[in-house]
Image (spheres, grey):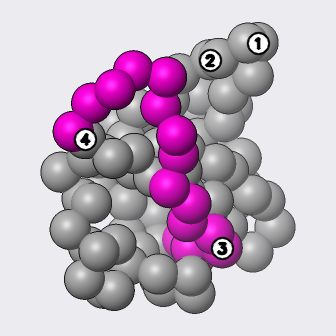
Amino acid sequence: MLAIAMLSNGEAQGDDLKPILQVVDIRLVNTQKQSNNERYRILLSDVMHLQQGMLATQMNSLVKSGKLQKGSLVRITQFVCNVIQGRM
């Protein structure tokens, strides 16, 4: 089974899996609260599946410096999966 399917089915947790995924899209998100922390929505692919998520604010510098961009390959070393509006 491919990485994103394992993540979305709950078959892998935090440290169980360290998949290499491709960044398909990164977008700056307008947050409802006025805060100094910009948030980026990221779309990842394991070739068969897509999964969107929010980039941790500690990683924003990677986007701003251009080190993380569309087409980048990334190894996910830490993640948290949450169900939002009935979807993971």
- At 50% across and 55% down in the image, what residue appears? 28
Alpha carbon separation for disc pair 4 and 1: 26 Å
Look at label 1 and name its amino acid.
Answer: Gly
Instruction: State which region is magenta.
Output: 21-36
Please tell me whether residue 29 belongs to the stretch shown in magenta.
Answer: yes
Alpha carbon separation for disc pair 2 and 1: 6 Å
Q: Residue furthest right?
A: 48
- At 27% across and 60% down in the image, what residue appears? 60
Q: Which quadrant: the N terminus?
A: bottom right
Alpha carbon separation for disc pair 4 and 2: 23 Å
Assess whether mark 1 and mark 4 are in contact (beta carbons under 8 angstroms). Answer: no
Please tell me whether residue 54 belongs to the stretch shown in magenta.
Answer: no
The first of marks 3 and 4 along the sequence is 3
Label 2: how many Cα within 10 Å (few below 14, some 14–19, many 20+): few
Look at label 2 and name its amino acid.
Answer: Val
Residue 66 position by quadrant: bottom left
Assess whether mark 1 and mark 2 are in contact (beta carbons under 8 angstroms). Answer: yes
Q: Nearer the viewer, residue 17 or 33?
A: 33
**Residue at label 1?**
86
Residue 82 x %, y %: 53, 21
The first of marks 4 and 1 along the sequence is 4
**Residue at label 3?**
24
**Residue at label 4?**
37
Assess whether mark 2 and mark 3 are in contact (beta carbons under 8 angstroms). Answer: no
Up-down relation of residue 38 to residue 24 (above or below): above
Secondary element at image label 2: loop
Secondary element at image label 3: strand
**Residue at label 2?**
83
Q: Which quadrant: the C terminus?
A: top right
Q: Is residue 50 left or right of residue 6?
A: right
Alpha carbon separation for disc pair 3 and 2: 21 Å
Label 1: how many Cα within 10 Å (few below 14, some 14–19, many 20+): few
